[in-house]
Image (cartoon, rainbow, N blue to C red):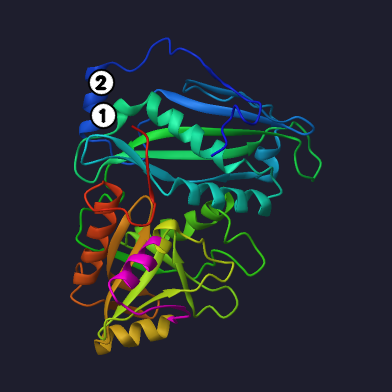
């Protein structure tokens, strides 16, 4: 695999003047929550038109200096990824499918008219940060070090065109459970809002998609639910995805269905991994359309026995109750289903080195 040095780049390492003390870090790792605490270091690489990628630095995590006219603040040229570093059964540290995140990052960059980052450099940047902050990986079951690579347009100008300067940055956050309710299954609200439209940016992992989901997500929480589910923009009947997760439906004959990737749904890496694992289990998995009316009917008749959401942050999460303006229904028993639990257990076991990785998904760091 190519490295930064192969591209004519080398990392500059800057010392941290005041790293977090061991006692303070231990207190944080004992109950990290999700996305509220951050490790000591960050990676920054610059891109300039005509020069390409340059000035790769790993140093103390600190505020970013931006001109008030920076393009990201006005025209939202911004993309990001999310992946995790896990403690392995043998004590080493590993990433799960970082090359897939690198490839999706570049697809998002293309859609947002941003420069692509060589995939090897994406992975190396993450590895270097994890090595620097390996003491920030929690030991608790289900915990991990969440990694957030992102790119922003930094050129100062107010014309509507792609920027000529960007920053690629990676930060890290120790992570526990994503959902705070502690319930065995989540409750979701069927939104009247639309997440993405055909021809839009639904398949890109960009901040604008998530900003658009905040009002409907707030509405769901205000109504006592954990998450919101979006329907398609054209007919407002076909299930697409949750606020930040893909969905799977399990039927009484053992078959599975997940909404097909139409360009309005984010192609989740966890989603793709579960497709593979389910087929290994001998299950029939279909990628297709599934309507909200059919979801309700199948749940009430008993044909649908499980629904689960999946994503990097929450991994695999059972859906127990679905509510909307047309009433509510319960999926199966309203709690975790057997297949949901089995697929989650297999995925987590591979991620943590407790089950053989036969797909080349695990990348050991050391």
**Quadrant occupied by the C terminus:** top left
Q: Secondary structure at mark 2?
A: helix
Residue at 58% across, 65% down? 196
Measuring from the top left, give residue 97's x and y in whole percent. Answer: 42, 49
Q: Is residue 39 visible?
A: no
Q: Which residue is mark 1?
A: 28
Residue 277 locus on image (x, y percent): 33, 65
How would you rate the neighbour count of disc 2 (Cα within 10 Å): few for under 14, some for 14-19, many for 20 or more?
A: few
**Image coords of residue 272 (percent x, y):** 43, 63
Label 1, residues with CA under 10 Å away: few <14, some 14-19, many ≥20: some
Mark 1 lies on a secondary structure that is helix
Camera-side residue of 338 and 124: 124
> Does residue 293 lie above or below 162 as drawn?
below
- How many numbered marks have been drawn onto this rendered protein structure? 2
The spot of residue 349 in percent (x, y) is 24, 53
> Which residue: 42% across, 39% down?
147
> Mark 2 touching mark 1, by CB under 8 A?
yes
Instruction: Please determine whether, in this image, residue 138 is positioned above or below residue 252.
Output: above
Residue tagged by mark 2? 24
**Which quadrant would residue 159 be assigned to in this image?**
top right
What's the CA distance linking mark 2 and mark 1?
Answer: 6 Å
Q: Is residue 265 toward the left or the right of residue 106 in the image?
A: left
Q: Which residues are magenta?
A: 273-291
Q: Residue at x 32, y 59 (%)?
A: 226
């Amino acid at each position: 695999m190519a490295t930064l040095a192969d591209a004519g780049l080398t990392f500059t390492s800057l010392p941290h003047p005041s790293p977090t003390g061991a006692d303070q870090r231990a207190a944080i790792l004992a109950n990290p929550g999700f996305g509220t605490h951050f490790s000591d270091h960050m990676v920054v690489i610059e891109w300039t038109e005509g020069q390409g990628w340059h000035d790769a630095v790993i140093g103390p995590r600190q505020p970013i200096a931006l001109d008030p006219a920076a393009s990201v603040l006005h025209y939202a040229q911004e993309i990001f990824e999310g992946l995790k570093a896990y403690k392995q059964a043998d004590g080493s540290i590993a990433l799960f499918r970082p090359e897939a995140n690198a490839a999706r990052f570049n697809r998002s960059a293309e859609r947002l008219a941003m420069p692509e980052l060589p995939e090897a450099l994406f992975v190396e940047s993450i590895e270097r940060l994890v090595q620097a902050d390996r003491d920030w990986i929690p030991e608790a079951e289900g915990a991990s070090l969440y990694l957030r690579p992102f790119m922003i347009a930094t050129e100062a100008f107010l014309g509507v065109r792609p920027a000529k300067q960007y920053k690629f940055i990676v930060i890290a956050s120790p992570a526990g459970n994503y959902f705070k309710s502690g319930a065995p299954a989540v409750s979701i609200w069927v939104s009247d809002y639309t997440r993405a439209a055909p021809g839009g940016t639904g398949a890109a992992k960009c901040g604008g998609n998530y900003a658009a989901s905040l009002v409907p997500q707030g509405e769901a929480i205000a109504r006592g639910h954990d998450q919101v589910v979006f329907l398609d923009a054209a007919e407002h009947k076909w299930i697409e995805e949750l606020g930040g997760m893909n969905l799977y439906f399990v039927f009484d004959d053992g078959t599975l269905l997940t909404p097909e990737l139409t360009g309005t749904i984010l192609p989740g890496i966890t989603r793709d991994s579960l497709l593979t694992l389910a087929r290994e289990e001998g299950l029939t998995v279909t990628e297709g359309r599934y309507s909200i009316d059919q979801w309700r009917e199948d749940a009430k008749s008993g044909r649908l026995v499980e629904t689960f959401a999946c994503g990097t942050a929450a991994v695999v999460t059972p859906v127990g109750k679905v509510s909307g303006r047309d009433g509510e229904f319960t999926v199966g028993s309203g709690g975790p289903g057997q297949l949901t639990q089995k697929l989650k257990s297999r995925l987590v076991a591979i991620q943590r080195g407790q089950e053989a990785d036969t797909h080349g998904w695990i990348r050991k760091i050391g």
